[in-house]
Amino acid sequence: MGSPASYIPRLADAPIAELLGEVPAIMLLGPRATGKTTTARRFARSVVRLDSEVEAVAFRADPDAALRGLDEPVLLDEWQAVPGVLAGVKRAVDDEPRPGRYLLTGSVRGDVEAPTWPGTGRLIRLTMYGLTVREAARSGGRALIARVRESGIEGVSVPRDPPDLRGYVELALRGGFPEMVEDLSPATRSRWITSYVDQMVTRDAKQADEGRDPVRLRRYLEALAIHTGCVVEDRTLYEAAGINRKTAAAYERLLRNLIVLEALPAWTSSRLKRLTRGAKRHLVDPSLVAGALGVDPAGVMRDGVLLGRVLETFVVSQIRAEAALEPIPPRLYHLRAEQGRHEVDLVAEFGAGDLIAVEVKADAAPRAGAARHLAWLRDAVGERFLAGLVLHTGTHVYELGRLIWAVPVCALWSP
């Protein structure tokens, strides 16, 4: 992805270009190795690698002086390696708030969410996840959720050559890291993601938190990988990892800080009673399941429980990456009634309170029963319910009930 000829256009390209024309500074945040630097370089006239000690020295000593005189826009790559640079950017923007001055990229979220973070009101944040299948296929078009909201089922189309179930598993385990999307052999791809996980639990985690134990952190990551895409008690995870509750809470904060783990909060409503409030955890990229557990597509296909969880994590990763870059992003949730009487994998809520609900099924021809939880939600919330989608592994779009349709997963990346 380094050369212009091989660059894969990213969903972030358009909002970055638009924002640089209007605001002084942008922060591009996302997991390590998802292409943030490659994308940001295309907009920058000066590039500073703050994870390089040689380049970081001056910015650590005097960020104001180091920033002065650089051709703008200036890319400050991996800003978290020299956190003091943010104060320099703040002062520069306060003094001269003209558009297009700074691009910052980072792979750690924690400082950005701190109450005293100096970027508030001065930096526009964009979150950039791994390559979606739409990006990798260069297919263009709008996000499925956005199309359904605007045009209903008429906005849904299916690619000419949809995958089968095995194809979806292969796409999921290929993941969205640009290096993994390259034309690599399965063996090399496995080595790459295994190495990524190894470095994340040792080097990356150490930079973010000196107190962690890489062996126990890896065990906790393995427990999360096994339970990705499901609602699970905290005790189940920390007992599986052989750690206590306090350590598990610290490791979970660390993995969220490193943008390896995301949590879908529980959707709630005053009109519905007895809804659980626990979040549903997903690894941010389904390929991390392969890296953490050492499984391949054949292994996932043999495990029906893991198959469903990997497929759901894959779907959520595609929707999350596109939603994050919408001008007004929908809020993403899951829904679960007490004792699991009703469960909806993903609920996208828009600013006016309108909902699109999604169920994911490893089934090539789901019947009406697969939509029963969506029908329950539709009837409970009334006019707020715009559509329910049962995303499946078959090839056809068809109606399952009023405002509810069966839609192939591959419609997520159809033009």
Image (spheres, grey):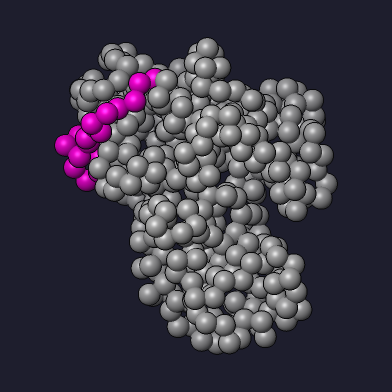
Report whether 246 appears left or right of 41.
Answer: right
Against 377, is 50 above or below? Answer: below
Numbered-mark total: 0
Residue 220 position in % (x across, y down): 71, 31
Residue 70 position in % (x across, y down): 57, 82
Magenta-tinted stretch? 146-165
Q: Residue at x 59, y 69 (%)?
A: 76
Q: Is residue 281 visible?
A: no
Q: Is residue 180 visible?
A: yes
Against 334, is 352 above or below? Answer: below
Q: Residue at x 63, y 45 (%)?
A: 256
Residue 356 position in % (x across, y down): 32, 37
Q: Quadrant of residue 370?
A: top left
Q: Residue at x 27, y 28 (%)?
A: 161
Query: Nearest the camera: 267 or 99?
Result: 99
Q: Quadrant of residue 375?
A: top left
Query: Nearest the camera: 13 or 403?
Result: 13
Q: Quadrant of residue 368?
A: top left
